[in-house]
Image (cartoon, rainbow, N blue to C red):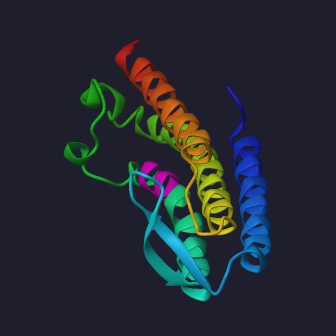
Amino acid sequence: MKPLWILALALILLYQCFLGCWVWSGSQLPDRVATHFNGGGEPNGWMSRSGHQGSMLVFGLAFPMLFVLLSYATRFLPRGLVNIPYRDYWLAPERRAETSNYLVRQSLWLACLAVCFVIGLQFSIVHANQQHPPHLSVAVLLATVVPFLAGTMIWAFMLMRHFRRVI
């Protein structure tokens, strides 16, 4: 099991990559950015460059951190609000801190995956807006979405497997 500081460092490094991508993409986008696309990849929603950059910054910072904050909150939430197998066992007073630490550690993995997903989304939008007319490539989008969904499913499976074990 990786120490918490290694996972936190990985998340910090990925956040730095996201911020670098975010800064770079600002110069790559037109003044009017296609930000929403229909099933055929045609744009059907637009934003100003500054509006898009502002919303991506907030989303890119908040979305991954949400997982970590929710996991940390399990230290303080009433038992009924924590939905894990064998909840009474895992949230017993003598195991609650250990359970919360495990959840935070695992949420750092998911947060790292989420930052990569947001970077991929930003690159997808930049790529789409560099086409004339703007067009979202299904291949580029799938290269972003499929690894995120697969990673999330593996993460959820591993989490459930851990909590199904009662020692």
Q: Position of residue 111 (x, y in %)?
A: 58, 49
Q: Image point 45% across, 48% down: which residue?
A: 71
Question: Which residue occupies the foreground of this view, 14 or 39?
Answer: 39
Residue 28 picture location, percent across and down: 76, 74
Of residues 90 and 6, the one nearer the viewer is 6
The one of 101 and 83 positioned closer to us in this rendering:
83
Task: Name the quarter where the N terminus is drawn.
Answer: top right
Where on the picture, by quarter, is residue 14? bottom right
| Residue drawn at the location 43% of the way across and 23% of the way down | 157
Q: Position of residue 18 (x, y in %)?
A: 72, 62
Q: Residue at x 46, y 62 (%)?
A: 42
Magenta segment includes 167: no
Q: Is residue 70 magenta?
A: yes
Write down the region rendered in magenta: 66-71
Residue at left 74%, top 71%?
25
Horizontal side of residue 101 vs 8, given as left or right: left
